[in-house]
Amino acid sequence: MDERGKSSSDDLRRALAQGDAMLEGIGPIIGHLLSAPDHSLFSDEIVARVRGMLADLARQVLRTQAEATGQKGRDAFADRHGEALAEHLQASSGLLLHCHALAIEWQLTEKLEDQLGIDPVLAPLLQRLIADSDGTVSSAAMAALAAQARFAQAQRRMELPLGELPGDLLHELLLAWRRYCGETRSDAVARAEGKLRQSFDESSGRLALFARLVSSSSGTSRSALAIEDAGAALFLSALAERSGQTRELAILSSHARQTVRLALGLRAAGLDAERIDETLLRLHPGAAPVTGLEGIDQDTARGILLASGHGKKR
């Protein structure tokens, strides 16, 4: 790497570290806001949506528990214990950050609809993929469309189906449920947990469906990096896949204060500096441009991301 490239790389590393310092505080801040009446430090909408998703996850687990114990009033049982279990789930940093990322993704989805007229469910690229002559691509796109429709409906209701969790987070949730039950955990609870694990199919969830669609061809993954054509869901899945980041980090990089991470992610994904500037301008018209991108290549950008404290895949 020449001196210009080294200087650009060093500058971007420092800028990324500043953005990562803010990410370090997201979990503790969200946890505090969910348990405190004053939400002024974060968007009330985001906090309410995270709270709603955790409450919905708790209710689903409790309804399964009630069914396993033979109780007739599943909903009443879930209502009695839901608030306490949801509060207990707040201690799960993985669940908390995942719900926060989904809330941010939905916020971005609504922003793209308001500002660019992109349908929250059927983005232009997804529509073309549904009409693709390749039956495999077309089928995958149809499945992704159905999953995105479910996601939109769930977000409007501030809900999150258990089946839409990544497998490691379902496991984390069930362990948290075990701890919540403590010494009172019965055989019925173990049966309920077994039923939830047996019925879980991560491959049919929205995140897996979009990941498969993005990886179905190199052309699809490149096209999906045009957010004005792909919409939020496909764009974020492609960004995560091609930059080597978790999808949660790709989502958080869409925030106005994470433009350096977004720019590095797009560079690691293969976009040139001009296209990156166009994307940043669409998302954050008032943000300062990220300098130094023309001085680094795709591998250097990926290396900078991986070297950061938040750069590794889950």
Image (cartoon, grey):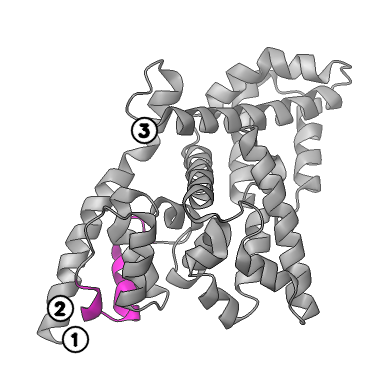
For the residues labelled 3 and 1, the Cα–Cα distance comes to 39 Å
Please state which of residues 174 and 270 is positioned toward the viewer in this rendering.
Answer: 270
Residue 207 or 314: which is nearer the viewer? 207
Q: Name the quarter where the N terminus is drawn.
A: bottom left
Callout 2 crowding tier (Cα within 10 Å): few <14, some 14–19, many ≥20: some
Q: Secondary structure at mark 2?
A: helix
Mark 1 and mark 2 in contact (Cβ < 8 Å)? yes
Q: In percent of the image, x 34 and y 62: which residue is there?
A: 280
Q: Is residue 48 above or below residue 128?
A: above
Q: Report the magenta stretch's main SS.
A: helix
Q: CB atoms at circles 3 and 1 under 8 Å apart?
A: no
Q: Nearer the viewer, residue 99 or 310?
A: 99
Report the magenta residues as a range.
Answer: 292-311
How many angstroms separate mark 2 from mark 3 (CA)?
Answer: 35 Å
Q: Amino acid at mark 2?
A: Lys
The residue singled out by tag 2 in the image is 6
Look at mark 3 in the image and give the residue it sits on. Answer: 28
What type is the residue that disc 1 sits on? Met
